[in-house]
Image (cartoon, rainbow, N blue to C red):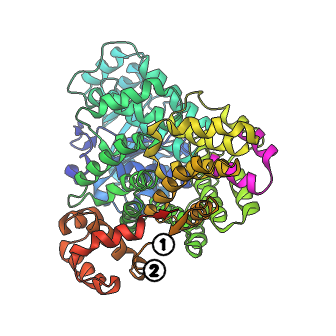
């Protein structure tokens, strides 16, 4: 085994038999076999884990083996532990079955799962399994000091490991002392709290992907247990001591993204001011908590760390979070660039969820820009790649994207049918995070589909399930939804309140939708002079983003206010004649970025950037780079007159 690679996530322990075991590992107890287990192991390997612990009793060895094969990580870089089910007759026969299910030729560590039938009953068979080359190391699990001594007294080969229950409240010092006397490595020792933090971190990741309330509850319960553990704090050299706040923020963000923000957001900002151990996870937490600008900055930093040779596969999850942070913050072309890169990585490493996220990002940008023909095929590809019954985050994003596309096309009944799937009749969300990001779109569809009363009841039931202070983003979305569904004389208070908070500008598309709806309401109240500046601001945002359906609606509202809205002065559709990549390069160059800066952002070489620019100039009808700024401004800046 290549120990340099296999232990890069946290060092290795030398066993008495001369083999080494990575000290940090992922256990898959209670992880259901199938896609949930496969993806959990894949995410762990992507995050740098190189030790996976399964067992015959868990029923998921086949899923672990599939994840290992799909990951693209070489076999000699991953340490696999499995355990003999003590109700079986022969550890050799059982080991052969494990190897078939895992798709391996040898188990790295084979343990007796628990001492049923006596501590020594299975040990001779364990020794035979090692003699036949089925296992490199053998050991026991859940043995107390007397049981461990009995095995050592009667066996030929002593156990290399005793895997014991880790309880943050109790050190079990006597058992640890016995393991030390017999030169048996104690696995899951309370002297390594990083193991527990990493396990709860992974549970929280699964909770956010699945959106299952019971998984969220288990992850939070585990966090509470870690937070309340007795005894002295971990020593400074312990990796978890420096990362506990980062783990804690991630776990809380994943399990309750709208809760306790008065505590968690200041904690997030304080932690960001220091050196980050894992900027990828931290940046993703900032995105989930709607600290969007912080998320973009930290995720880009994480991506730069991960561009070193040999670690490209580990950037898939970071790119997925960056895609959505860029969508939320109005950096749509950057989001598409990140999605392309993530798609390439997903194809190389067979990362279904990373591929699905990339396709969803591309689809939602296409929906917002009115590229209707692209949306349905992309969503179909996501459904084919990801089991949306298990991964409800994907199901929620698909419904939101399909609903947005239907709204853009004016098929409002279809839009409401899609978006209403995000909540049960009692307000229970399909997904505890993503469902709420579509509440305003749900209200917009309901108004146009004439489902006001039904949607108003559903909305209030849904919002009653989140914290009363869920943060400025959800407050802005909820205010827009309530304004749309309110009686005409009660709408203005809802529309106007979030517009008084400049934080709402962090999410420009959502802000512009609010301004458009408020401007329309003002016009219908015959308050034309109040409506005009709000509608012009919305139009500027929609044009800058390229949100064509909403641009047309804003232009229509302005015309109804008596404003003559001039089309951009450049050739109609000038940028439309470019490929998607040429368009991104031209926009970035027009904003003043150098070829090197563009290449770094879009993962290209400077020479490729220069070539695309050279081919774009004739299509744009310009002579060179100095004219790009003007043509980009003309394409995205509205010019309104009375």
Disc 2 crowd, CA 10 A, few/some/many (<14, 14-19, 20+): few
In the picture of the structure, the residue carrying the numbered disc 1 is 567
Kindly check if marks 2 and 1 are in contact, taking CB atoms under 8 A apart as contact. Answer: yes
Magenta includes 448?
yes
Which is nearer the eye, 489 or 299?
A: 489
Q: Which residues fall within the magenta stretch?
A: 440-459
Q: Is residue 593 above or below residue 186?
A: below
Which is nearer the eye, 383 or 189?
A: 383
Which structural element holds mark 1? loop
Residue 97 pos. (x, y %): 50, 55
Residue 223 pos. (x, y %): 46, 26
Which is nearer the eye, 603 or 48?
A: 603
User: Residue at point 22% right, 80% down?
Assistant: 624
In the picture of the structure, the residue carrying the numbered disc 2 is 572
Residue 577 pos. (x, y %): 41, 82
Mark nearer the viewer, 2 or 1 = 1
Magenta includes 483?
no
Between marks 2 and 1, how big is the CA–CA gap?
A: 8 Å
User: Residue at point 40% right, 44% down?
Assistant: 292
Which structural element holds mark 2? loop
> Which disc, if any, is residue 494?
none
**Would residue 315 be found to the left or right of residue 540 on screen?**
left
């Amino acid at each position: 085994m290549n120990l340099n690679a296999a232990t890069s996530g946290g060092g290795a322990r030398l066993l008495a038999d001369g083999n080494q075991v990575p000290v940090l590992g992922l256990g898959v107890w209670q992880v259901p076999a199938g896609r949930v287990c496969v993806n959990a192991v894949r995410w762990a390997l992507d995050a740098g884990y190189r030790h996976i612990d399964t067992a015959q009793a868990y029923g998921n060895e086949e899923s672990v083996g599939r994840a290992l094969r799909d990951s693209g990580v070489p076999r000699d870089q991953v340490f696999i532990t499995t355990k003999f089910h003590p109700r079986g007759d022969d550890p050799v026969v059982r080991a052969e079955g494990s190897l078939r299910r895992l798709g391996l030729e040898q188990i790295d560590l084979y343990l007796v799962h628990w001492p049923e039938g006596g501590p020594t009953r299975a040990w001779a068979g364990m020794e035979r399994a090692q003699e036949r080359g089925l296992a490199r190391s053998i050991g026991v699990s859940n043995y107390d000091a007397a049981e461990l001594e009995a095995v050592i007294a009667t066996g030929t080969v002593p156990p290399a490991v005793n895997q014991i229950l880790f309880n943050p409240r109790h050190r079990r010092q006597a058992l640890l002392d016995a393991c030390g006397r017999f030169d048996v490595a104690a696995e899951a020792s309370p002297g390594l709290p990083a193991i527990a933090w990493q396990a709860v971190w992974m549970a929280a990741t699964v909770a956010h992907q699945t959106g299952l309330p019971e998984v969220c509850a288990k992850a939070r319960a585990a966090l509470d247990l870690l937070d309340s553990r007795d005894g002295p704090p971990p020593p400074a050299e312990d990796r978890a001591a420096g990362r506990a706040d980062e783990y804690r923020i991630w776990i809380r963000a994943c399990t309750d993204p709208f809760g306790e923000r008065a505590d968690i957001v200041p904690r997030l900002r304080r932690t960001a001011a220091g050196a980050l151990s894992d900027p990828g996870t931290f940046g993703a937490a900032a995105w989930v908590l709607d600290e969007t600008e912080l998320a973009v900055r930290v995720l880009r930093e994480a991506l730069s760390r991960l561009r070193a040779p040999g670690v490209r596969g580990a950037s898939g999850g970071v790119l997925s979070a960056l895609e959505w942070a860029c969508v939320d913050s109005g950096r749509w072309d950057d989001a598409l660039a990140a999605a392309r890169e993530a798609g390439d990585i997903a194809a190389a490493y067979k990362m279904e969820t990373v591929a699905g996220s990339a396709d969803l990002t591309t689809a939602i940008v296409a929906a917002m820009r009115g590229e209707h023909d692209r949306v349905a095929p992309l969503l179909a590809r996501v459904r084919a790649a990801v089991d949306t019954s298990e991964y409800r985050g994907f199901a929620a994003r698909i419904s939101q994207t399909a609903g947005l596309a239907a709204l853009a096309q004016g098929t409002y009944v279809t839009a409401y049918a899609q978006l209403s799937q995000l909540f049960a009749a009692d307000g229970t969300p399909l997904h505890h995070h993503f469902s709420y990001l579509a509440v305003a779109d749900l209200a917009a569809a309901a108004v146009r589909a004439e489902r006001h009363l039904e949607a108003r009841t559903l909305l209030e039931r849904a919002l009653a399930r989140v914290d009363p202070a869920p943060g400025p983003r959800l407050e802005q979305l909820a205010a827009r939804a309530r304004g749309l569904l309110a009686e005409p004389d009660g709408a203005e208070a809802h529309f106007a309140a979030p517009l008084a908070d400049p934080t709402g500008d962090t999410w420009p598309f959502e802000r512009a939708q609010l301004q458009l709806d408020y401007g329309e309401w003002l016009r219908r109240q015959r308050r034309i002079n109040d409506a005009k500046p709000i509608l012009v601001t919305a139009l500027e945002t929609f044009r800058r983003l390229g949100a064509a359906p909403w641009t047309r609606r804003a232009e229509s509202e302005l015309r109804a206010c008596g404003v003559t809205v001039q089309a951009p002065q450049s050739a109609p559709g000038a940028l439309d004649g470019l490929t998607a990549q040429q368009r991104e390069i031209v926009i970035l160059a027009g904003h003043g970025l150098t070829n090197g800066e563009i290449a770094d952002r879009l993962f290209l070489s400077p020479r490729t950037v220069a070539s695309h620019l050279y081919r774009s100039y004739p299509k744009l009808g310009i002579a060179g780079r100095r004219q790009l700024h003007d043509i980009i401004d003309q394409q995205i800046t509205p010019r309104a007159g009375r």
